[in-house]
Amino acid sequence: MAERLGVGLVGDGELRELLGLALRRNPKRAHLLVSNVLGKHVPQRPSVVYGAGVELGRRVRALLGEDGVRRAVVVGYAETATGLGHSVADGLGGAPYLHSTRRPVPGVARAGGFEEAHSHATSHLLLPEDPELLAADGPGSALVLVDDEFSTGNTVLNTIRALHERYPRDHYVIVALVDMRSPADRGRLTEFAAEIGARVDLIARNTGTVTLPDGVLEKGQALVAQQEAAGDAPQDGPPHPRPHTRLDLPWPAGVPDGGRHGFTEAHRALLEPALPALADRIAQALGDTPRRVLVLGFEELMYAPLRLATALEDRTDAEVRYSTTTRSPVLAVDDPGYAIRTRLVFPAHDDPADGPGERYAYNVAGAGFDAVVLVVDSAADTPALHAPGGLLDRLAPHTEQVLLAVIPSYVPGAPAPERQEEVSMQLPEPLRGPAFSSYAPDEVGWLLQDLSDTRLEAPTEEREEAIQSGGAHYAESLPVEYQPSAAYQELFKSALALSAARIARAVGTVTETVLAERGPRPVLVSLARAGTPVGVLMRRWAQARHGVELPHYAVSIVRGRGIDANALRWLAEHHDPADVVFVDGWTGKGAITRELAAAVAEFEKAGGVAGFNPEIAVLADPGGCVRTYGTREDFLIPSACLNSTVSGLISRTVLRADLVGPDDFHGAKFYRELAGADVSGLFLDTVAARFDEVADAVDTEVKELLAADRAPTWEGWAAVERISEEYGIHDVNLVKPGVGETTRVLLRRVPWKILARRGAGPDLDHIRLLAEQRGVPVEEVDSLPYTCVGLIHPKYTRGATGADGKAVESA
């Protein structure tokens, strides 16, 4: 800037430490003052960034006094000073904070606006949730305006003029990191204060001036063109396949993600004690490896990631830095004397009102960060963020680990913070691997409580007797986990090899149907545990084919007891219920389909949040019970062949009054001791490896399905009722149709006999093997809508199985 354009920075030694110079790619102003303590363009220690704002706030507090602080309002400027203004408000203490925004929010009335003439994005909106926030509270109540720099004063004068007409007051305080006005500009502010009849004070950390030669704008534009044509500015690296990890942070309910709609002392009182635990979650997700970590915020979302970074800095041995992405187009030149050394370019990912455009992250590439924690609000967690060429994709080549931390976008009009805190404190965060389950932490969050240290297993015969006699519910205990023989394990692997492409096609079909009909970013909620491997595969398909990271959780549903209402409450606090898509492995006769519909209706009737859609998406729907499915064929899904060892080593869920209280999630166990037999990863990886080869077939099939009548036929339920009567069972709960359910009868219940469709082939090899091991007869029948049906022993007594554990025919 000095050598090529003759731009000069005049000031003391500290000013030169605070600021650098760069060249804007902007036809309105040639130069950019690059702050080293703002946390926007230059990664800096978060404690330094936050401390700079807090110290300015303390100076304002000394100016206003205790009474003045209580009646003051702090306003920061978007996008650059949103975090600085919030930090000033923290240092001031007791004053509400609001920042201007360039993001219109439906349903929130505009309380004012102003123009920033030199900016690349000129219009600022003021959207307080409280329409009286900006009104003066009597004589002497101050409006504190915070910007990163005070260069000409035009933006501040425009702001005061616009607000003074609507909310007149007699005191304004202007706060900036640096005051760079010329003598003429200083005189203009004095004249303006006299014009409106108000006191105007200015507080800055340092002062100086910028000297600009004649014709600098034209020369600057020419230099930008020259440098970019020469390729002197390092750009993005090549695409990198390294995956990222997603972390939905347990942000305190009711606390805004920033000051876009106002941030009060009540909000601050809820956020401060929550920060250490939030930082611990991030540190846990990062692990012990990273030595240098960047917490990267997003445009106007500066304060939340800054506070997360300050808390992380206190709670980790890693070197932590903080900066944010920006709309501001700046030339990058890799020269030690230049402030912007590198830039990453990516498309906007928050559906901005002014349309799509480029966004930037400066001085991140080549900075040697072992890990980047990207913090965005949920409104910005869109397909564009995850798509090829998106920000996550651009970050990958420059770090070993990318962690995406998402906090909920604040919606004005939400319940009061006090009530929200009361609810959220009762509900813990999801359990994740490797502490709970063998799945990777980003694959699924289990909305369950860990009962691994509780003895819950009972012999199969004792459980069956208690269940059928009405003495116990099946969810009050667990069967002893079936340990597959070597022959059975080989059968599983063979079945997986034969059916992997078929399953991949069904995964693709159901996922594409969900994406087409339930929005671009549904929240997958699998019904533990059979639905969980399917949910993980659907998540992998969306990531592989669309670059979209779908949130995925597993919840408990119990026949006769309903879905876990606390899990629904947690989901409603963290996501829009309308985005939730329930996922299961397959349908049998449709009992769980009906159970879920009744449970959701009961949840709403009891005062729960409305909006959950009880329809289930399944891999296979042989019973004709749902409208969203991958296939309606009844074939062998290898994950049905095993129990926990294909489901992340998690037991089926448990609901027992002495273990699960009114404020608890349902329970489950993590069988760590079975790690040697775990094939959960093998199942997922084998199926996912076939995604590419079935993609064309999936596209064709989905087009046909979307145009077809997919209304449930309930054919399976009719068949089950007929079989129940024909075989003298008289209880549809003892008839388990389909390959998956029949497998579970043989593994977990006391089987009576197996009905197999005449001529069924390899899909039933594992059924025949299990039946032989347990002495269960297999009867071939005609006119069966399923490949097979398992019948639980209808007249169970201890004599229904012999001493060898094999089935005995009932009289």
Image (cartoon, helix red, strand yellow):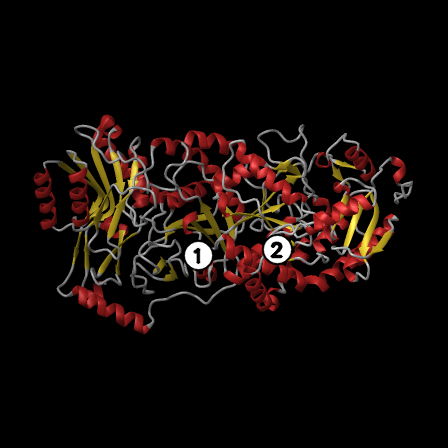
Residue 297, horizontal then vertical, whole percent: 39, 50
Residue beneath the point at 58% across and 40% down = 447
> Which of label 1 and label 2 is nearer to you?
2
Q: How many marks?
A: 2
Q: Quadrant of residue 269?
A: top left
Q: In the rendered view, would you say 422 is above or below 17?
A: above
Q: Is residue 109 left or right of residue 275?
A: left
Relative image position of residue 325 (x, y in whole percent): 36, 54
Q: What distance separates the C-alpha of mark 1 from that of mark 2?
A: 28 Å
Using the image as rendered, state which of residue 163 and residue 758 is in the foreground: 758
Q: Residues within 10 Å of mark 1 (few under 14, many from 20)?
A: many
- Residues under numbered marks 1 and 2 in contact, where contact means CB atoms less than 8 Å apart: no
> What residue is pinned by disc 2?
629
Q: Is residue 534 left or right of residue 163?
A: right
The quadrant of the picture occupied by the C terminus is top right
Quadrant, the N terminus = bottom left
Tell me the amino acid under the disc marked 2: Tyr
| Coordinates of residue 367 in the picture (x, y in percent) | 41, 58
Q: Which mark is residue 370?
A: none
Task: Return the residue nearer the eye: 414 or 755.
Answer: 755
Q: Residue at x 68, y 62 (%)?
A: 500
Residue corresponding to mark 1: 385
Q: SS for tag 1?
A: helix
Q: Is residue 323 left or right of residue 466?
A: left
Visible residue check, residue 482 = no
- Earlier-in-chain disc, 1 versus 2: 1
Q: Is residue 61 above or below residue 586?
A: above
- Residue type, mark 1 in image: Leu
> Dot 2 lies on which element?
strand
